[in-house]
Structures are given as C-alpha cells and as structure tokens.
Image (spheres, grey):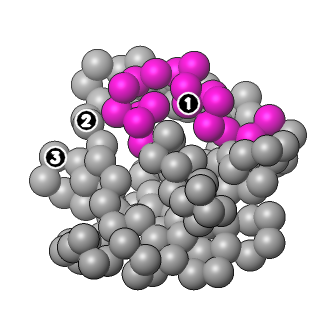
Amino acid sequence: MTELDAVLFANEAFYRAFADRDMAAMAEVWAEHAPLSCIHPGWGLLEGRDDVLQSWEAILGNPGSPAVGCLAAKVHMQGDMAYVLCYEEIEDNYLIATNIFVHEGRRWRLVHHQAGPTAEEPPIESESDDEDGLIN
C-alpha cells in the first residue's frame, strides 16, 4: 500500500465511522498527540481532542443525523502531513470538505475536519480516474 492509499484508507475509515455511527471507531481515526480542530457546517471552531470528540458523540448519537457519503476524494501530501478534499453527500445535497491527516506512529490520523455547503456537484468518477487527483 502506498502512502497515498494509506491516507485514502484513513479518510474512508473516518466516513465509515460516521456512516456506522461508531464512536469508538471515530475516536480511533483522530490523532491522540497532535492538536485537533473541527468545524462542522454552521458550528463554530472546536479545538482539542475532548471538544472535537464530544461533538462527534453528539452527532453520532442523534438518531436524526442524516447519512453521509464521501465522493471524489483527492489526496495532497507534504511530508508527514496530507489533506483530502472531497464532497460529502447528505440527502441529495452536497458539502465540500477538507480532512487533514498527520502521520502519527505507524498510521495516518485526522487532525482537522471542516465541511461546508457548495453549489457544485462532485465530478463524475470513472475507473480510469484511480490515480487522478493524487498529488505527491
């Protein structure tokens, strides 16, 4: 597995935890030693592991929270930091998101998530797009 694949795997783990409403998996995705921050749509800035994870506990524990899917993820890497730009699909609407990862220990872990509304729809992906958008 390349480092780009590993970052995409970490990004997928984040959205899988979100979709499964799995708080233990969500906590595993986030870094333990690096500073954390999160900006949910319509929320203010959350900083620190406790505040960020409490926000996810509230979201995942709310039965009215909509299902979220990740589309058109693109990785950009710089040393031990990587960020993923992607679209989030929520009830036939789209948000655009940035997920920032750092290499912590032997894996990539999330340090920042921010999502907000966009009028754009994600690009249509094809099997030939596998390497498109992956930048070293």
- Residue 68 visible in the current orientation: yes
Label 1 vs 3, first from the N-terminus: 1
Residue 56 x, y percent position in the rendering: 52, 31
Residue 11 x, y percent position in the rendering: 51, 51
The Cα–Cα distance between marks 3 and 2, rounded to whole angstroms, is: 7 Å
Task: State which quarter of the image contains the C terminus.
Answer: bottom right
Q: Residue at x 34, y 53 (%)?
A: 70
The residue lying toward the viewer, choosing from 99 and 2, is: 2
Q: Which residues are magenta?
A: 15-32
- Residue 47 visible in the current orientation: no
Residue 25 counted in the magenta span: yes
Q: What amino acid does circle 3 point to?
A: Glu
Residue 134 lies left or right of residue 78; in this view the side is left
Secondary element at tag 3: loop
Q: What amino acid does circle 2 point to?
A: Pro
Residue linked to disc 1: 26
Q: Can you tell which mark lies on residue 66? A: 2
Residue 105 counted in the magenta span: no
From the viewer's perspective, is the residue at label 1 or at label 3 nearer? 1
The residue lying toward the viewer, choosing from 111 and 47, is: 111
Q: Residue at x 51, y 77 (%)?
A: 134
State if disc 1 and disc 2 touch (CB < 8 Å): no
Residue 36 lies left or right of residue 114; in this view the side is right
The residue lying toward the viewer, choosing from 54 and 81, is: 81
State if disc 2 and disc 3 touch (CB < 8 Å): yes
Main SS of the magenta segment? Answer: helix
Residue linked to disc 3: 91
Residue 124 x, y percent position in the rendering: 19, 74
